[in-house]
Amino acid sequence: MTEPNVAPPSAGVNKYPLLATPHIHLHGPVDHAMYESFRQQLADAPREGSLVVAISTLGGDPEVARLMGDELRLLREFKDREILFLGKVAVYSAGATFMSAFPVDKRFLTRGTRLMVHERIMDSTIQLSGPLKSLTATLKAKLHEIEHSIQIEEEGFRDLVAGSKIDFDEVQTRAPSNWYIEAEEARDKGLVLDVI
């Protein structure tokens, strides 16, 4: 009787056994419900040693992604803990924003995972009504909101590519058309340490 064809385990399984059992599992839209789940799982996670955070998402609120990333940064810096990122299947939009909070040598993707990076999107209507001088203030306030959002977006892009082979200009050029990056390409470009 012959043995069925079974794919050999990924080399990553042997090199990074900790990644097989993440401490925090995030999936679905990046929103306040994900943040609550993140906070609870973080509270329940071991207090010492390496911490693995896995995510699969089609995107969501970039500010929630930044908030979760900042909480992990503080934990990393003040508690001197190793925190590893594991992207699974889809790490789109706000998921890539979350990934940017991790140094490139602490980022991993599972085989077949894709990243998607794009510009922030605003859907807004401006209602102009009232004295003319007040209208200019309304327009200036909206312009300041847009300018500040662009600044935050650019900071995120710089964090995403810091330490990789991708320069800021490339991500700026490709983001407007929704830049999809396969796991192996992300590894080859240095966006992540490895694919498992």
Image: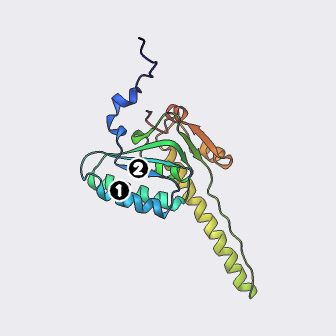
81 displayed left or right of 148: left
Q: Is residue 25 above or below residue 131?
A: above
- State the quadrant of the N terminus: top left
* Cα distance in 3D space between marks 2 and 1: 8 Å
Task: Give the residue drawn at x 68%, y 78%.
Answer: 138
- State the quadrant of the C terminus: top left
Q: Are marks 2 and 1 in contact (CB under 8 Å)?
A: yes
Task: Give the residue drawn at x 26%, y 51%.
Answer: 46
The residue that disc 1 covers is: 41
119 displayed left or right of 110: right
Depth check: 40 or 67 in front? 40
Q: Is residue 184 above or below residue 58?
A: above
Q: Position of residue 155 (x, y in %)?
A: 52, 54
Residue 6 appears in which quarter of the rendering? top left
The residue that disc 2 covers is: 25
Q: Position of residue 179 (x, y in %)?
A: 63, 43
Q: Which residue is the extreme one toward the bottom?
A: 131
Q: Secondary structure at mark 2?
A: strand
